Image: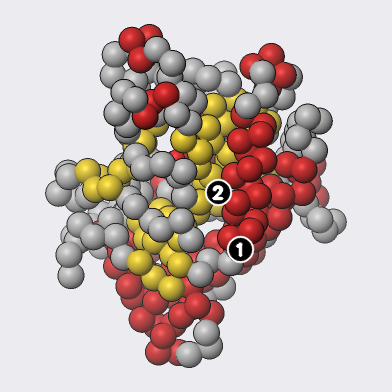
Amino acid sequence: MDINKIATVDFNDLMSGDAQKKAAFVKEMGDSFSNMGFVIVSNHGVTEDLRQELFRVSKKYFELPEDVKAKYEIEGLGGQRGHTGRNKESAKGSDLPDLKEFYHVGQEVEDNDPIKDNYPDNVWPEEVPELEEISLKIYKTFEQTGKNLLRAIALYLGLDEFYFDDKIHNGNSILRMLHYYPQENVDNIPDGAIRAAAHGDINLITLLMGGSAEGLQAQALSGEWINVQPNPNEIVINIGDMLARLTNNKLRSTIHRVINPSKENLKTSRYSMPFFMHPRAEMDLTCLESCVSDKNPKQYTDMTAGEFLTERLRELGLLK
Ligand SMILES: O=C(O)CCC(=O)C(=O)O
Ligand SMILES: [Fe+2]
């Protein structure tokens, strides 16, 4: 097995009902998460039509004038809903802003779960009314795909298959529509600033719907930067810091980044769509006993997902 390689797995193998195919999926996915922290998934449930629709509305939204988008940047939400403008987010430990802007869609609770009161309302742009229906459709699809992937992860960890189910029910997940905006004058870019500086994701797992251009790289155990290049009909899954904590780094939350293209291509946009799968705030992230041993002593303090998220949003400069 090449530990610097990101495996591609077929989601149909997990869902087929064939025990052997399912076991092979679990093993291949889990090993790739242990080594690279990433896996590429085909047949993930989002249709090609829906994917194209989402990119179309995302483009329509980001082409709105800056002062219109600024209406959807709402003070006090820590960037958790609606618009976050250019130069706002920098990676943990970096003081250079990323060359991006984004729009966040959060959980819409549909049952009587009182957790509803803990979540801010979504913000919808009146100029692009179709964004609501399309982004919520993708949100629900990714939530379902993510739930099934977490069942496979639970099996890989030797847990009950449904270990994560109640922890992610009405979880605090976020769909991010990302726009790496064109740089008309590359001389204006602060020295060293890139589209997305090296970072780990905060959440349990991230489901990423393809960038419209190359640029995503993940850092292998060897330190080498590996290009992450899914086909347009595949999604990229990576482990976030919450799952690394829970598993005491058995599953890797791999540092990744989006590098700048050539000077000429910097004049064009890049679009991508990560779905950050979060649990409910009360989920306990204490390292699993099965992941702690004399050889691999416990590496994290005990925290809930909510406490950890607050800490990280402060470090990112999104919460004051
Ligand atoms: O745009 C991409 O391809 C990756 C984005 C990313 O890593 C993030 O937003 O956390
Ligand atoms: Fe990321």
Farthest residue to the top: give it.
Answer: 188
- Does residue 26 lie above or below 255 as drawn? below
- Give residue 47's mark: 1
From the viewer's perspective, is 156 left or right of 1? right
Q: Nearer the viewer, residue 238 or 287?
A: 238
Q: Nearer the viewer, residue 131 or 239?
A: 131
User: In which of the image's four quarters is ligand 1 placed?
Assistant: top left
First of labels 1, 2 by sequence position: 1
From the viewer's perspective, is 181 left or right of 117? left
Q: Identify which residue is drawn at 55% across, 69% down.
A: 148
- Give residue 231's mark: none
Going by the numbered disc 1, the residue's amino acid type is: Thr
Q: Is residue 43 visible?
A: yes
Q: Is residue 163 visible?
A: no
- Does residue 159 lie above or below 215 as drawn? below
Tag nearer the camera, 1 or 2: 1
Q: Position of residue 58 (x, y in %)?
A: 63, 38
From the viewer's perspective, is 292 left or right of 185? left
Q: Position of residue 140 (x, y in %)?
A: 68, 58
- Pointers 1 and 2 in contact (C-beta within 8 Å): no
- Give residue 275's mark: 2
Farthest residue to the right: give it.
Answer: 112
Q: Identify which residue is drawn at 81% across, 56% down.
A: 110
Image quadrant where one finds the N terminus: bottom left
Q: Total number of numbered labels? A: 2
**SS at circle 1:** loop
